[in-house]
Image: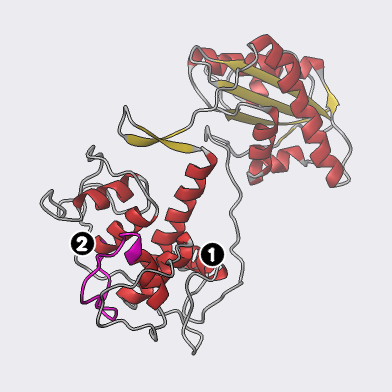
Amino acid sequence: MKLKISTALLATALLLTPAIQPAQAASFTDVPISHWAYEPIDAISELGIINGYPDGTYKLNQPVTRAQAAKIVALATKTKPTQDFTPDFKDVTPAHGAYDHIRALTEHGIFNNGEAFNPNASLTRGQMAKIITLAYDITVDDNDLISFRDVKKINGYHSYITTIAELGITTTEQGGEFKPNDPVSRAHMAAFIQRAIEFDAKRKSGEIYYDKAQQKYVDKVYSIPEPPPSQMDDSQAAQTINLVNTERKKKNLAALKQDKELSAIAKAKAEDMAEKNYFAHNSPTYGSVGNMLDHFKYDWSAYGENIAKGYTSAETVVQGWMESPGHRANILQSRFTNIGTGYATDQNGTPYWVHLFSAK
């Protein structure tokens, strides 16, 4: 009796990345790992940018005060005051714990100098947008690629809000309410700062830059010439077999034999998907995988198929399959003895990959 081994479909054109398990480093008793802000809170608390309370809590929904915000932003941006500058504030003395941080940001024009700083007042979301934009020296433009129904152009924070929205520092939905006058919670402040840090790192590395012609930040495009399809067939497609056998070796499984007959069938399936613009195990030309094997008069006692679309290298497609339970099960199936691989591109250059496994 023939055994059909089914697979899960790797239908995404992007590499599936493994879920990153956050560390338990600076755990707060009121911040469960399941909370949406756990990772940013954990990340910036590890950097010493933000602290919890003496009772071990973080107080997620507690509003951030202007003094706390000054300390957080100054530490995140490593902004320090000069010895010669003294602000005019009457309500913040050198004895205040955030005095030097307030002084530093005020000297750099991030806070306005004046008689009152209001250190204990809650920082609003509009104010948050402004100080992050100024502190990270983010170019403000007037493209308004994102807008919010409660942030009009007459709002003094309008340009700052739309700028950080365009960069993903705030993830408020396009056309929704930004609530510029609402206080910033400690949970949201952690998220805003972490995203700003990530933006700054990408800008410093050259991964993103400000395009004056487009008046916006854009990703740097790294142009890597793709090998022609014939070269990809011979090198990349064949390389996937070595990568699969490397994974099997880790599990003390026998290496799969490269089967030229099976590779010819896998190539026919890849070309069929590319030509007819579909992505499925069931082919409109050959039918099911079993039917296709029978069509080409291939003798089998068990089979499996992995397919993928959009991956541009042998390494990424095999990694994608290994991170998908159904596809990994095929790669690590102890009964399989043979493997065939096929590769093709459609008229737009989109790659299609096929692995066929068999037991004979």
Tell whether position 110 is magenta: yes
Q: Is residue 257 above or below residue 97?
A: above
Q: Residue at point 40% right, 53% down? A: 136
Q: Secondary structure at mark 2?
A: loop
Please identify the quarter of the rendering in which residue 1 is found. top right
Q: Is residue 67 above or below residue 308?
A: below
Residue closest to the far bottom: 55
Q: Main secondary structure of the magenta part?
A: loop
Q: Residue at point 69% right, 28% down? A: 314
In the drawing, what numbered circle is on residue 184? none
In the drawing, what numbered circle is on residue 43? 1
Q: Residue at point 36% right, 71% down? A: 103
Colour pattern: secondary structure
Residue 265 lies, in percent from the top left, at 70, 16
Say which residue label 2 marks.
179
Tell whether position 129 is magenta: no
- Mark 1 → mark 2, Cα distance in angstroms: 26 Å
Residue 278 as seen in the image, left or right of residue 144: right
Q: Which residues are magenta?
A: 106-125
Q: Is residue 55 above or below residue 125?
A: below
For label 2, the crowd category at 10 Å Cα-Cα, with few meaning under 14, some 14 to 19 and many 20 or more, is some
